[in-house]
Amino acid sequence: MPQEIAEILAGNIVRLGYDDLPRDVRDVTKSVILDTLGAMLAASSMGQGCKEIAGLVLKAGGRPESTVLGYGEKVPSWMAAFANGAMSHALDYDDQLHEGPFHASMTDIPAALAAAEAVSKVSGKEFLTAVALANELICRLGLCLSRRPGGWVIDWSATAVFGRFSATAAAGKLLELSESQMANAFGIAFSQAAGTFQIAASTGAIRGVHGAFPNMAGVLSALMAKEGITGCSETFEGKNGLFNAYFNGRYDRATLMDDWGKRFETVNLSFKPWPCCRFSHPYVDAALQLKNSGIGPQDIESVTLLVGDVTQRLCEPMDRRRRPQGASESKFSLPYIVSSSLVRGSPVIEHFTPDGINDAATLKMADRVKFQFDKDFNPPAGTPPGAVEIVTRDGKRRSVRVDVPYGHPDKPLSVEDLHNKFRDCFRYAAKLPPEENTEKVIDMVGNLEDVADVSQIIDLLIPVS
């Protein structure tokens, strides 16, 4: 009987180490760690629902193992993973894979942080390796759907469903699970896998904080397997396994299974320069180019957004999109995001706060925005292109189309912008760590291979008493 996918993947995760990671994989992994730390810190105060979830976890208490970021208190590892996981995506400021509509690091870095503190004395190399391999796993799981015949189908959320496995891989690697234990952990994680794209239709807090669930499930699954608890067999390819139950047996097996340790998809992760839906970023990029060309808000008569099937959803219903209700909704309102970019420039966190979304000049601009459907903006895969067309008050027409937005690997976020993003996020922590620790964290993550214990980094994020 051929070896099941879970067993092969478990072997890959357990077998591969730091020395198997190419330089570019190490570099991108250090960047996503810093990026995700910043996103979580900012969300600890600014993320819808994050304060409430942190409050629930801290009120429950328990063994002080792992830190709740932004608050500095310690709770059992799986509960820290739950709280920090809620923060990892709440601002929609975390990385994403261009070719597949899913997020990566939000599903496993909170789990890795929690497991590292619970284990104690995890080196920077060990931590980097766990995150890199966990990200590789979720990237391959997502891509094996987007690369199958017919491509992606909007039904299940890959972030939610596959995130249980990447979180399990990260925690299991740091807990030093054996191959059989890791395979069992995947089987345990499968019993907790869930999440449809209905969440994308939600305007409630759950849309942003759903990263809590895969991270907690990952730590719990790894701990249960470590204790000898066995999981489902034939997790991925069984009659009622993941691919048959969720995806009608349609997936590209080679994308998932081939060339582990030789080919790395994680190097293709995109970073977000702006805290809003990635599908809006080509339009932000285009709007900023128009603004920077010298066109001011007072010059604009009308704005037309050229959209495809996916991005049209960010425009309808237009009246609601022009006046988003709440921070979460504003991040998915293309008329609002483009208007804010034309009026205020590069989007920042404060533009998506309750006060920020009621900016009078932005709302006035939003009333001039309309959209036009164009099938050319329906790509076979990946983030759709975007175009913004402006008619100025003197009758002139200007248009900018962006196929590859800033932050994509082909148009990468600069190191300076990555560091500035972290600095900005750091200052929004619910309880502020010492300000001088900002640069210390940037330096330590940038030289993660030299860090003896990653808890040293977490200690720098502990707020002043």
Image: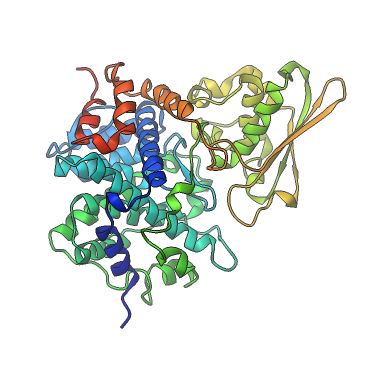
| Foreground pick, 458 / 322 | 458
Q: In this view, does 430 lie above or below 91?
A: above
Q: In this view, does 443 lie above or below 313?
A: above
| Foreground pick, 19 / 75 | 19
| Foreground pick, 47 / 29 | 29
Side of 424 relative to 335 (left or right)? left
Percent across and percent down for residue 175 are: 18, 51
Side of 201 relative to 221 (left or right)? right
Query: What residue is rendered at 46% in x and 56% in y?
Result: 196
Percent across and percent down for residue 150 are: 60, 66
The quadrant of the image that shows the C terminus is: top left
Q: In the picture, residue 240 is in which quadrant?
A: bottom left
Query: What residue is rendered at 44% in x and 23% in y?
Result: 420
Q: In the picture, residue 452 is in which quadrant?
A: top left
Side of 447 relative to 63 (left or right)? right
Q: Which residue lies furthest to the right in this view?
A: 395
Q: In the picture, residue 86 is in which quadrant?
A: top left
Percent across and percent down for residue 464 are: 22, 17
The quadrant of the image that shows the N terminus is: bottom left
